[in-house]
Image (cartoon, helix red, strand yellow):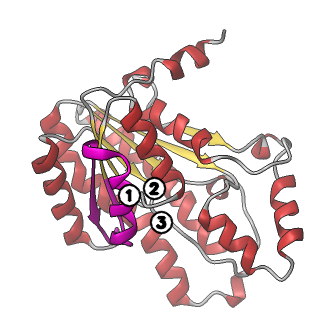
Protein backbone atom coordinates (compact mmCIF):
# COMPACT_ATOMS: atom_id res chain seq x y z
CA UNK A 1 0.00 0.00 0.00
CA UNK A 2 1.42 3.38 -0.97
CA UNK A 3 2.02 6.26 1.42
CA UNK A 4 -0.47 8.38 -0.57
CA UNK A 5 -3.27 5.85 -0.09
CA UNK A 6 -2.57 5.66 3.64
CA UNK A 7 -2.59 9.47 3.88
CA UNK A 8 -5.95 9.75 2.10
CA UNK A 9 -7.49 7.21 4.46
CA UNK A 10 -6.26 9.28 7.39
CA UNK A 11 -7.88 12.45 6.04
CA UNK A 12 -10.40 12.78 8.85
CA UNK A 13 -12.01 16.13 9.63
CA UNK A 14 -13.55 15.69 13.07
CA UNK A 15 -14.24 18.93 14.96
CA UNK A 16 -13.46 21.04 11.88
CA UNK A 17 -15.74 23.61 10.25
CA UNK A 18 -15.48 24.19 6.52
CA UNK A 19 -16.90 26.89 4.26
CA UNK A 20 -17.50 25.64 0.71
CA UNK A 21 -18.58 27.94 -2.12
CA UNK A 22 -20.47 26.77 -5.18
CA UNK A 23 -21.76 23.93 -3.04
CA UNK A 24 -25.21 23.39 -4.55
CA UNK A 25 -23.94 20.83 -7.06
CA UNK A 26 -20.94 19.18 -8.64
CA UNK A 27 -17.57 19.15 -6.90
CA UNK A 28 -18.73 21.52 -4.15
CA UNK A 29 -21.66 19.36 -3.16
CA UNK A 30 -19.59 16.15 -3.31
CA UNK A 31 -16.93 17.77 -1.12
CA UNK A 32 -19.52 18.86 1.44
CA UNK A 33 -20.94 15.35 1.65
CA UNK A 34 -17.50 13.76 2.01
CA UNK A 35 -16.47 16.24 4.70
CA UNK A 36 -19.61 15.58 6.71
CA UNK A 37 -18.99 11.83 6.43
CA UNK A 38 -15.52 12.44 7.88
CA UNK A 39 -16.74 14.40 10.88
CA UNK A 40 -16.78 18.03 9.75
CA UNK A 41 -19.48 20.65 9.95
CA UNK A 42 -19.91 22.52 6.68
CA UNK A 43 -21.28 25.88 5.61
CA UNK A 44 -22.44 25.50 2.02
CA UNK A 45 -22.90 28.64 -0.06
CA UNK A 46 -24.12 29.22 -3.58
CA UNK A 47 -25.68 31.91 -5.74
CA UNK A 48 -28.71 29.61 -6.04
CA UNK A 49 -29.88 29.77 -2.43
CA UNK A 50 -32.88 27.45 -2.83
CA UNK A 51 -30.74 24.77 -4.42
CA UNK A 52 -27.97 24.94 -1.85
CA UNK A 53 -30.51 24.84 0.97
CA UNK A 54 -31.95 21.66 -0.53
CA UNK A 55 -28.47 20.15 -0.81
CA UNK A 56 -27.62 21.05 2.80
CA UNK A 57 -30.88 19.63 4.12
CA UNK A 58 -29.83 16.19 2.85
CA UNK A 59 -26.75 16.32 5.10
CA UNK A 60 -28.62 17.11 8.31
CA UNK A 61 -27.53 19.36 11.16
CA UNK A 62 -23.85 19.15 10.14
CA UNK A 63 -24.58 21.37 7.14
CA UNK A 64 -25.77 24.98 7.03
CA UNK A 65 -26.69 26.76 3.79
CA UNK A 66 -26.28 30.41 2.84
CA UNK A 67 -26.88 32.33 -0.37
CA UNK A 68 -23.74 34.02 -1.66
CA UNK A 69 -22.49 35.94 -4.66
CA UNK A 70 -18.76 35.27 -4.34
CA UNK A 71 -17.93 38.43 -6.28
CA UNK A 72 -19.63 40.59 -3.61
CA UNK A 73 -16.94 41.81 -1.20
CA UNK A 74 -19.35 42.76 1.59
CA UNK A 75 -21.13 39.41 1.43
CA UNK A 76 -17.88 37.58 2.19
CA UNK A 77 -17.62 39.33 5.54
CA UNK A 78 -21.23 38.39 6.34
CA UNK A 79 -20.78 34.74 5.37
CA UNK A 80 -17.61 34.29 7.44
CA UNK A 81 -19.31 35.88 10.46
CA UNK A 82 -22.37 33.67 9.98
CA UNK A 83 -20.20 30.54 9.77
CA UNK A 84 -18.45 31.35 13.04
CA UNK A 85 -21.71 32.22 14.74
CA UNK A 86 -23.47 29.03 13.61
CA UNK A 87 -20.70 26.50 14.30
CA UNK A 88 -18.46 28.41 16.72
CA UNK A 89 -15.32 28.53 14.57
CA UNK A 90 -14.02 28.26 11.03
CA UNK A 91 -11.01 26.14 10.02
CA UNK A 92 -11.30 25.46 6.29
CA UNK A 93 -12.20 27.40 3.14
CA UNK A 94 -12.86 25.66 -0.18
CA UNK A 95 -12.95 28.27 -2.95
CA UNK A 96 -14.91 26.16 -5.41
CA UNK A 97 -17.39 28.51 -7.12
CA UNK A 98 -16.53 29.25 -10.74
CA UNK A 99 -17.54 29.16 -14.37
CA UNK A 100 -16.51 30.15 -17.85
CA UNK A 101 -17.48 30.79 -21.44
CA UNK A 102 -16.57 28.74 -24.50
CA UNK A 103 -15.45 31.44 -26.92
CA UNK A 104 -12.42 32.29 -28.98
CA UNK A 105 -10.24 35.27 -28.11
CA UNK A 106 -11.70 37.66 -30.70
CA UNK A 107 -15.29 36.67 -29.94
CA UNK A 108 -14.91 37.38 -26.21
CA UNK A 109 -16.15 40.80 -25.13
CA UNK A 110 -14.45 42.86 -22.44
CA UNK A 111 -17.53 42.50 -20.26
CA UNK A 112 -17.43 38.69 -20.59
CA UNK A 113 -13.71 38.69 -19.83
CA UNK A 114 -14.24 40.73 -16.67
CA UNK A 115 -17.16 38.56 -15.53
CA UNK A 116 -15.04 35.41 -15.78
CA UNK A 117 -12.12 37.02 -13.94
CA UNK A 118 -14.46 38.26 -11.19
CA UNK A 119 -16.11 34.87 -10.70
CA UNK A 120 -13.00 32.70 -10.87
CA UNK A 121 -10.16 34.90 -9.68
CA UNK A 122 -11.48 37.90 -7.74
CA UNK A 123 -13.63 35.61 -5.61
CA UNK A 124 -10.62 33.56 -4.51
CA UNK A 125 -8.80 36.71 -3.42
CA UNK A 126 -11.87 38.04 -1.61
CA UNK A 127 -12.55 34.74 0.12
CA UNK A 128 -8.98 34.19 1.22
CA UNK A 129 -8.66 37.70 2.58
CA UNK A 130 -12.01 37.52 4.39
CA UNK A 131 -11.40 34.16 6.03
CA UNK A 132 -7.85 34.64 7.32
CA UNK A 133 -8.83 36.39 10.58
CA UNK A 134 -11.25 33.55 11.38
CA UNK A 135 -8.61 30.91 10.69
CA UNK A 136 -6.20 32.74 12.97
CA UNK A 137 -8.84 32.80 15.71
CA UNK A 138 -9.27 29.04 15.26
CA UNK A 139 -5.51 28.54 15.57
CA UNK A 140 -5.20 26.45 12.39
CA UNK A 141 -6.51 26.52 8.88
CA UNK A 142 -6.44 25.18 5.36
CA UNK A 143 -7.58 26.90 2.18
CA UNK A 144 -8.09 24.88 -0.99
CA UNK A 145 -8.58 26.80 -4.23
CA UNK A 146 -10.21 25.03 -7.16
CA UNK A 147 -8.26 25.99 -10.26
CA UNK A 148 -8.23 23.79 -13.38
CA UNK A 149 -5.88 22.14 -15.84
CA UNK A 150 -6.77 25.25 -17.85
CA UNK A 151 -4.65 27.11 -15.31
CA UNK A 152 -1.68 24.96 -16.35
CA UNK A 153 -2.13 24.56 -20.13
CA UNK A 154 -3.84 26.71 -22.72
CA UNK A 155 -7.00 26.21 -24.76
CA UNK A 156 -7.78 28.37 -27.78
CA UNK A 157 -11.50 28.50 -26.97
CA UNK A 158 -11.08 29.30 -23.27
CA UNK A 159 -8.84 32.36 -23.14
CA UNK A 160 -10.75 34.12 -20.34
CA UNK A 161 -11.12 30.92 -18.34
CA UNK A 162 -7.44 29.98 -18.73
CA UNK A 163 -6.35 33.43 -17.60
CA UNK A 164 -8.60 33.33 -14.54
CA UNK A 165 -7.54 29.83 -13.49
CA UNK A 166 -3.87 30.63 -14.06
CA UNK A 167 -4.36 33.57 -11.72
CA UNK A 168 -5.79 31.22 -9.08
CA UNK A 169 -2.71 29.00 -9.38
CA UNK A 170 -0.23 31.83 -8.81
CA UNK A 171 -2.33 33.61 -6.20
CA UNK A 172 -2.38 30.35 -4.21
CA UNK A 173 1.42 30.22 -4.13
CA UNK A 174 1.75 33.89 -3.21
CA UNK A 175 -0.88 33.63 -0.47
CA UNK A 176 0.75 30.49 0.97
CA UNK A 177 4.06 32.33 1.21
CA UNK A 178 2.34 35.35 2.77
CA UNK A 179 0.82 33.21 5.53
CA UNK A 180 4.07 31.35 6.14
CA UNK A 181 5.98 34.63 6.42
CA UNK A 182 3.42 35.89 8.94
CA UNK A 183 3.72 32.63 10.88
CA UNK A 184 0.04 31.90 10.41
CA UNK A 185 -0.87 28.24 10.89
CA UNK A 186 -2.65 28.34 7.55
CA UNK A 187 -1.83 26.26 4.47
CA UNK A 188 -3.08 27.14 0.98
CA UNK A 189 -3.07 24.78 -2.00
CA UNK A 190 -4.73 24.55 -5.41
CA UNK A 191 -6.48 21.65 -7.13
CA UNK A 192 -6.54 21.37 -10.92
CA UNK A 193 -9.24 19.06 -12.29
CA UNK A 194 -9.72 18.37 -15.98
CA UNK A 195 -13.13 17.48 -17.44
CA UNK A 196 -15.27 16.18 -14.57
CA UNK A 197 -18.84 14.94 -14.92
CA UNK A 198 -20.54 17.99 -13.39
CA UNK A 199 -23.62 20.01 -14.38
CA UNK A 200 -21.25 22.63 -15.87
CA UNK A 201 -19.58 20.10 -18.17
CA UNK A 202 -22.92 18.49 -19.02
CA UNK A 203 -24.23 21.92 -19.99
CA UNK A 204 -21.19 22.51 -22.20
CA UNK A 205 -21.81 19.17 -23.91
CA UNK A 206 -25.53 19.85 -24.38
CA UNK A 207 -24.94 23.30 -25.90
CA UNK A 208 -22.43 22.07 -28.49
CA UNK A 209 -23.59 21.54 -32.11
CA UNK A 210 -22.85 17.81 -31.80
CA UNK A 211 -23.23 16.71 -28.15
CA UNK A 212 -22.19 13.09 -28.77
CA UNK A 213 -19.01 14.18 -30.50
CA UNK A 214 -18.28 16.73 -27.78
CA UNK A 215 -18.66 14.07 -25.07
CA UNK A 216 -16.28 11.72 -26.89
CA UNK A 217 -13.77 14.55 -27.34
CA UNK A 218 -13.83 15.41 -23.65
CA UNK A 219 -13.52 11.76 -22.65
CA UNK A 220 -10.51 11.29 -24.93
CA UNK A 221 -8.78 14.39 -23.54
CA UNK A 222 -7.38 12.27 -20.71
CA UNK A 223 -5.33 9.10 -21.38
CA UNK A 224 -7.76 7.15 -19.18
CA UNK A 225 -10.48 7.91 -21.77
CA UNK A 226 -13.29 9.01 -19.47
CA UNK A 227 -14.61 12.01 -17.59
CA UNK A 228 -13.56 12.44 -14.00
CA UNK A 229 -15.97 11.82 -11.13
CA UNK A 230 -16.78 14.48 -8.57
CA UNK A 231 -15.82 12.22 -5.67
CA UNK A 232 -12.33 11.77 -7.17
CA UNK A 233 -11.76 15.52 -6.90
CA UNK A 234 -13.45 15.75 -3.50
CA UNK A 235 -11.09 13.10 -2.15
CA UNK A 236 -8.07 15.27 -2.97
CA UNK A 237 -9.75 18.38 -1.59
CA UNK A 238 -10.49 16.61 1.70
CA UNK A 239 -6.90 15.41 1.95
CA UNK A 240 -5.56 18.94 1.48
CA UNK A 241 -8.09 20.29 4.01
CA UNK A 242 -7.04 17.77 6.66
CA UNK A 243 -4.02 17.42 8.92
CA UNK A 244 -2.93 14.44 6.82
CA UNK A 245 -1.44 17.02 4.42
CA UNK A 246 0.23 19.10 7.14
CA UNK A 247 3.47 19.54 5.15
CA UNK A 248 1.76 20.37 1.84
CA UNK A 249 1.68 24.10 1.18
CA UNK A 250 1.64 26.31 -1.91
CA UNK A 251 1.31 23.22 -4.09
CA UNK A 252 -0.77 22.42 -7.17
CA UNK A 253 -2.52 19.05 -7.38
CA UNK A 254 -3.76 17.82 -10.75
CA UNK A 255 -6.78 15.51 -10.89
CA UNK A 256 -6.88 15.03 -14.63
CA UNK A 257 -6.57 11.37 -15.62
CA UNK A 258 -3.11 12.09 -16.99
CA UNK A 259 -4.11 14.95 -19.32
CA UNK A 260 -1.17 17.18 -18.38
CA UNK A 261 1.29 14.26 -18.34
CA UNK A 262 1.46 14.29 -22.15
Question: Dot 1, crowdedness within 10 Å: few (<14), some or many (≥20)?
Answer: many
- Name the foreground residue: 91 vs 152: 91
Q: Is residue 237 visible?
A: yes
Residue 84 picture location, percent across and down: 14, 47
Residue at the disc numbered 2: 96
Residue on which disc 3 sits = 120
Q: How many marks?
A: 3
Q: Quadrant of residue 203?
A: bottom right
17 on left or right of 238 = left
Give the image quarter of residue 26.
Answer: bottom right
- Over which residues does the magenta segment extend? 44-70
Q: In terms of secondary structure, where does tag 3 sit?
A: helix
Task: Say whether disc 1 or disc 2 marks the residue closer to the N-terminus.
Answer: 1
**What is the x, y in percent for residue 154?**
72, 62
- Where is residue 129 drawn, in percent x and y? 26, 55
Residue at figure coordinates x 82%, y 54% from the top left = 219
Q: Which residue is mark 1?
A: 21
Q: Nearer the viewer, mark 3 or mark 1?
A: 1
Amino acid sequence: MTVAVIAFRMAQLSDRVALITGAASGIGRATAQMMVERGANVVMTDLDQARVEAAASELGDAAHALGQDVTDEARWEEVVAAAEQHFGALHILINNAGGGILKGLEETTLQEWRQVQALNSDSVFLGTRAVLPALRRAGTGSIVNLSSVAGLVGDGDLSAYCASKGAVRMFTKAAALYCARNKDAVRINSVHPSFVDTPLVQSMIAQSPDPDRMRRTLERAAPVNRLGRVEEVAEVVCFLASDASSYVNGAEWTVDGGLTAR
